[in-house]
Image (cartoon, grey):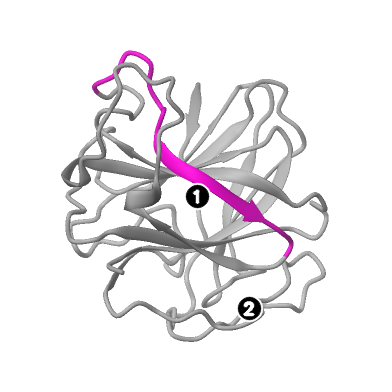
Amino acid sequence: MRSVVILGLLCLAACEPSTVETLTASPACPLPNVQLPPQPQAYLIIDDLEDGDNLTGRTGGLGGNWEIWDDDSAKPTASVSNTCAALGKYAMHLSTTGQTGWGASASVFFAAPPHPSPFNGSGWNAISFYMALSPNDTRPRTFRASVSTMETAWNGRCTSCVDNFGTGVAVTGRWQRFVLPFADLRQMGWGVPPASFKLDEIVQFHVALDQKFDVWIDHIQFERL
């Protein structure tokens, strides 16, 4: 499994999390949100991408980074782009012409390397993010979004790893905000040993992608619902 640390662009503007500023000038961009979802009263931004790099926020104990994992059959592209965004002016753009093995995935680590390292997320009970398909990726489908713990993360306390706590998200060509309550996340069942969701030992936010994809992800944050 190859892990690629991605590079970003220089941020030119700060994100205003209370307004949607979806950019629609380019035909390569997803459609805007139908309406502005309500912001929670309590949240911690993991990464709004507005700093233009592959690092997460540095508040609330955060200190991680983005990584792209793939099956070594093709090289996915990943960049912080100011072409499209759900909030602010920057979003993460991920694409590949076609993997031939298990595919690829995007991960956002909460704590600084070495990975895996535990992050205490006990102050929060959900994670949210925006995601959309590019217009040239015309097949709406479900991706698995998940959170790993020290008991499921690659090289963590497991012998069959990456059976993370997750759920499916139905992604289309329109920006959507997905909210994942931790209580609703489940393992698929093949991990060894079976794990419990220890909120004080969470490691990363993870989105498993297909063999071929062209997607955007933006504004990931912890929430207290």
Q: Is residue 112 above or below residue 171?
A: above
Q: Does 83 lie within the magenta span?
A: no
**Residue at image location 66% in from the left, 53% down from the top:** 215
10 Å crowding of disc 1: few (<14), some (14-19), many (20+): some
What secondary structure is marked by label 2? loop
Q: Is residue 107 visible?
A: no
Going 19% across and 63% down the picture, which residue do you hit?
A: 60
Query: 10 Å neighbourhood of mark 2: few (<14), some, or many (≥20)?
Result: some
| 21 or 202, nearer to the observer | 202
Disc number for residue 66: none
The stretch in magenta equals: 157-173
Mark found first going from the N terminus, 1 or 2? 1
Q: Which disc number belongs to residue 7?
A: 1
Q: What number is the disc on residue 22?
A: 2
Q: Residue 162: x percent and y percent?
A: 41, 27
Residue at the far top: name it.
159
Q: Is residue 162 left or right of residue 29?
A: left
Identify which amino acid the numbered label 2 is placed on. Answer: Thr
Q: Is residue 179 above or below residue 5?
A: below
In the rendered image, residue 216, in percent from the top left (x then y), is placed at: 62, 57
Residue 90 as seen in the image, left or right of residue 188: right
Element at label 1: loop
The percent coordinates of residue 223 (x first, y second) are 32, 66
| Above-or-below relation of 166 to 11 | above
Identified at 49% across, 77% down, the residue is 12
**Label 1 to label 2, Cα distance in Å?**
23 Å
